[in-house]
Image (cartoon, helix red, strand yellow):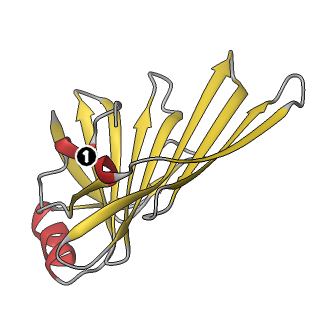
Amino acid sequence: MEIYYCDKWSNIKKKPWNIIDENTAKALHENSHPYTAVLSDGEQPKYLVNVTDKWVSVSFLDDYGRKYLNYDFIVKEDNRIFLRTIMYWEYEEDTQSKSMILGYQENGHIAMEQRDSKTGEVEERETKDDVTRNWDIFPEFGQYLYLCKEER
């Protein structure tokens, strides 16, 4: 897996806005300024890791460069992050057909919304569960792959 860095990723153009070198990205990381790490398999970007001092997000890209899964972590004390939101999208051809959003709170409260774009059907649920697996460690510079697990 190769890594390159940019200021930001364009979801519309499916490419980086401004590629930055590793030293610049490392300085941004050390000074708690935002940047994006693009993890690619050859020419194909697979994961986008956005790092800021307040949140970290991981986007999973399909072979067409579309997001199909996204994790949003909130930065907490003691160099820890908490997985607060999961978003999932399904596509038929070029059109998004289904989406699901899961929202987590540290107290175990979980809210879910599932949408079917074809039928307009919306399903919502709430529950409480153990969310200890939602905790992780804030990434060290260049060490992002452990966050790119689809099964959480």
The residue sitting at 50% across, 24% down in the picture is: 64
- Tell me where residue 40 sits by quadrant: top left
Residue 121, picture quadrant: top right
- Image coords of residue 32 (percent x, y): 24, 81
Q: Is residue 40 above or below residue 37?
A: above
Which residue corresponds to the image point at 18% horizontal and 60% vertical from the top-left? 139
- The percent position of residue 126, horizontal first and vertical second, equals 66, 47
Classify mark 1: helix, strand or loop: helix
In the picture of the structure, the residue carrying the numbered disc 1 is 147
92 over 139 or under it: above or below:
above
Q: Is residue 15 visible?
A: no
Within the image, what quadrant is residue 43 found in? top left
Residue farthest toward the top in the current orientation of the protein: 93
131 vs 90, nearest the viewer: 131
Which residue of the protein is positioned furthest toward the bottom in this rendering?
A: 31
Residue at image point 47% right, 44% down:
70
